Amino acid sequence: MSLVQSVDNVALLPAYLAAGTAVLVLLVDLLAARAVATVAVAALGATGTALGAALVGAAGDRRTFCVGADCSWLWTGRAALVAVVIALLTLGVLALSGPLLRAGRVPVGEYCFLLACAMAGGVVLGAAGDLITLVVALETLTLPLYVLVGLRRGSLAGAEAAVTFFVVSVVATTVTLLGAALLYAVTGSVHLDRLGAAFGADGERLLDLPLSTVAVALVVAGLAFKVAAVPFHAWAPATYDGAPLPVAAYLSTASKLGGVVALLAVVQRALPATVTGPVLALLAVLTMTVGNLVALRQQRTVRLLAWSSVAQAGYILAPLGALALAGGRTADARAGAYAAAVAYTVFFVLLELAAFAAVVALRPADGDGGALADLRGAARRHPWVGGAFALALIGLAGLPPGLAGLFAKVTVVRALLAGHAGWLALVVALNAVLGLAYYLRLAATLYAAPGAVAVRPARIVVVALGIATALAVVLGFAPQLVLDVAAR
């Protein structure tokens, strides 16, 4: 019996646009050799990719590369959202890269080409329907970043950061591929939906095999590296601090979004929640707690943002961990957990990009993030940029008027409560208080007068605790948490 594979070119249009942008950038740089033309083509390609992804997504769900019911490309609303956000992040990073490119220490053609390649990987990642496509797309997103981190000429810190990132990432990819191979050995399939069906129909039999548990653990551990989850986080602060600021922004946003999308895909559709849930819940607690505690002690701007990014990854993982804690409870609770993780990630990457944009604007061209002391009084000298930076920090902390960050944290906490994971919601709330401490401290530094005494962290923690308590009462977290605990 012959099997015919279907191909839907309309569904593949966003991938064509992203990959075509990379090829076109390479050709323009080769033939025109003008930096302005190269950057313009990359920016237009990113814009076209975002528009194409939105238009195809608005037309409804599409599938291609299908054999029978198994499809390797699933273009859904979530895939369209991921593609649009990745393309917009690429466009934003290109805009931030102006001072770096004008300084002349980074080759423009290679820089734009590598960014376009990473964008193509991110676009494909959102639509991946099997483990092979997922891993290849994730590596296509990540591989150009190894080079971008160390692309700055004459930068020893950049070279060290690139080597660190490369070595650790290769190990993580190897672990993921080993887990995928073991899953194939156990189930005979690499398609995500078929894996989920296998664990659903023969769950007890498959989970009784030690090989199954090892395979699931390896896949989760390998993908946890991509989101810088503890204990797979050690690469992030050093890599962010050694990379050029726009590249650090891309690592902290697009790369993290890709890791979350990959982890969400395997947890939601392929792997058994009874195994992944406790692991992800533990990773979430460790990640948010370690990230916040270490961020309190940071004196360099990019390292503080890197450790806060680690902590934010914990908030993203928390709803995924609640899935298995909810066990076989309602589909609405599970859908709410998935939606909370995606919503939080989108809001986080936009606020994080805004924070890095402010650092780029406040620091010298081609400079690093510097120390926190270098930003003292920056909002007094540059009111608009400083105000935007402070607003981004307040949004990451989850305080008004940063409504995006506040909405994201509310969504996560409500999803955890709906999934009957009240204790995890309490951990998220306590860690949010710790996060307020260093975000508010940095915001206060921006407006501090020269020579003013730095605000003590302990005092900031007390203020943050009071604000968090007031918000908890206003938003109804405390009554709902009591009712949830009483119901159990």
Image (cartoon, grey):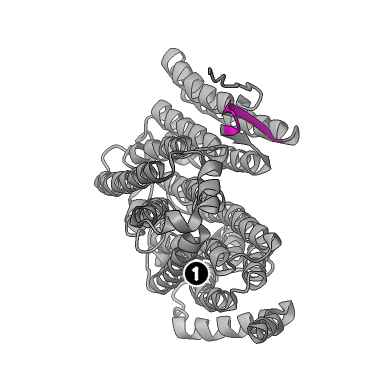
Q: Residue at x 44, y 40 (%)?
A: 138
The residue that label 1 is drawn on is: 442
In the figure, residue 63 lies in which quadrant? top right
* 452 versus 93 height, above or below: below
Q: Residue at x 41, y 57 (%)?
A: 228
Residue range (magenta) = 61-70
Relative image position of residue 335 (x, y in whole percent): 66, 57
Q: Is residue 64 magenta?
A: yes
Neighbor class of circle 1 (other Cα within 10 Å; few <14, some 14-19, many 20+) is many
Q: Quarter of the image for the C terminus: give it.
A: bottom right
Relative image position of residue 330 (x, y in whole percent): 68, 64
* 200 versus 43 height, above or below: below
Relative image position of residue 78 (x, y in whole percent): 64, 44
Relative image position of residue 309 (x, y in whole percent): 47, 60
Question: Camera-side residue: 430 or 172?
Answer: 172
- In the image, taking residue 47 as reference, residue 208 lies left or right, namely left
Q: Residue at x 53, y 86 (%)?
A: 462
Q: Is residue 380 visible?
A: no
